[in-house]
Every structure is written in C-alpha cells, then in structure tokens.
Amino acid sequence: LLRVLGQSGSPEALTELTAAITDPSVALRNAALNSLAQWPNVAPLPTLAARLPQETEPGSRLLLLMAARNLIGRPGTLSEEDRFLAAKKMFEAAKDNREKSEALATLSRVIHPDAASFFDALAISEPARTRESAAISKAIQAKLAKVVQVPDKVTLTPQAADLTPGSALNVISGLLVNWLNDGDSASWMLRFESPGTYEISVLQSSESDKEGTYEVTIGDQKIVTKAVKTD
C-alpha cells in the first residue's frame, strides 16, 4: 500500500507518508522512505531534511538521504534556493563519511550559485575532497550559464536544452530530431523575472501517420498534447 501511495503524488498520500516516517516501527519508517523516494515531484524534500536530525536508526538515515538524492532534481514549485537549503541542512546533520557522501551527491544536483560556492568552500576545508568538489562546482557553474532569463517573452532553442543522456536526440539545422523513445526529453532551466500567467507555444513537425503525444512540464504543472503529422 505504501508503495502505491508513493506513486500517487496526491496531497493525501503525502500526508500519510509524512506521518509514517516518524512511526515507532523501523520497518514502517523504511517502507515509507522507499515510497517517498518514488514521489513524482520534489515536494517531500523539506520534510526529509527536517526529519534527518531526529532519525536515530542508521539504516533509516541512509534511506532518507538516498530518497532526498532521488527527489532533488524532480519538478515542483520548490525553488533551487530552497532545494539548496534543504540539502545543506542534511549535509550538516550527517554523522559519518557515508552519510556526508550521500548528502553531497544531493547537493551536487542543485543548480544555484550558493551550491557552487558551497563546493568551492568545501574544496578548501576538506583537502580529501578538493578535486571532486572543484569539479562539481565547475559543473554547476556551467549549468548556471545555461539558465534562461524570462522577462515576458522568450524563445527556447534546441541548442540550449539538456537532452536525455544516451538517447538518440540530436540537433540538426536548428531542429531537435530523433524522438524515438518514451523517455526522451529536452529540458531548460528558466528564471522568471515576475510571477504571472504565461503562454507556451511549441513548433513541431512529424512525418509519421501515427499520432503521438508529448508532455510539457513546468514546476508541478503538466500539459499533455498531441504530436500530429504535418505536410
């Protein structure tokens, strides 16, 4: 039942699982943590960060840290700054090197200037992690350079997208081609200058007689639409 709850993404299921990770039963806590690791968005992350300092069972602590690592890059309304703060809190609560490594793996997936600065400082304070921390900081800064500012209107180009690793997706003549598998995706990191209602337009073409579907996701909002044959 808990596994099903973890896949539902509903507020009611999140409430149930949040309560379960504080249950006196270690087995129930662990089952709830495994379910939260499958949550479809980043919503449980602050709860996991708040729970770690209180958790005393070593195995449960590792499951909690691994769940956070799974969730940190998932869509949702939690800002990159808040993701960084939650992950940093977990690093500060880590008790040993293994827990620190899990927390650092989570922090390395945050695309925010504070995350890059964190790893710059870590490279100095922990000489054993200097090379790894410097490489992570460099990777974060490279991703930050690709962040697209959204004033009121912007065009997202295929060249600026992060594509599914290992997929056949490719950019040819300014077009994103070879959408062959269900898991293929292109993503952009956006920074909106002001809140509001935005219209999304997608320019697509297809030579296939078979009608397909694709999803457009931003934050925790999702639109499913059709890919149709064009002349």
Image: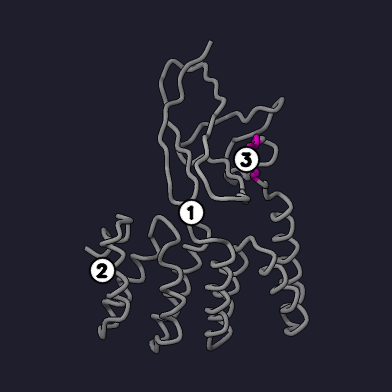
Which residue lies under the disc numbered 2?
16
Q: Label 2 to label 1, Cα distance in Å? A: 21 Å
Q: Find disc 3 in the rendering and name its residue.
A: 152
Quadrant in the picture for the N terminus: bottom left
Residue beneath the point at 64% across and 44% down: 150
Indicate the secondary structure of the residue bearing disc 1: loop
Q: Which residues are magenta?
A: 150-156
Q: Which mark is residue 11?
A: none
Is 152 on the left or on the right of 119, as rendered? Answer: left
At label 3, the amino acid type is Asp
- Classify mark 2: residues with Cα within 10 Å, few (<14), some (14-19) or many (20+): some
| Sequence-earlier tag: 2 or 1 | 2
Of the two numbered discs 1 and 3 on the same chain, state the one appearing first in sequence: 1
Q: Secondary structure at mark 3?
A: loop
Does 90 sit left or right of 48 as displayed?
right
Between 163 and 93, the one nearer to me in the picture? 93
- Figure check: 223 above or below 89: above
Percent position (x, y) of residue 29? 30, 77
Residue shown at the point (36%, 71%) measured from the top left = 33
Residue neighbourhood size for the residue with mark 1, other residues' Cα within 10 Å, grouped as few (<14), some (14–19), many (≥20): some
Circle on res. 75: 1
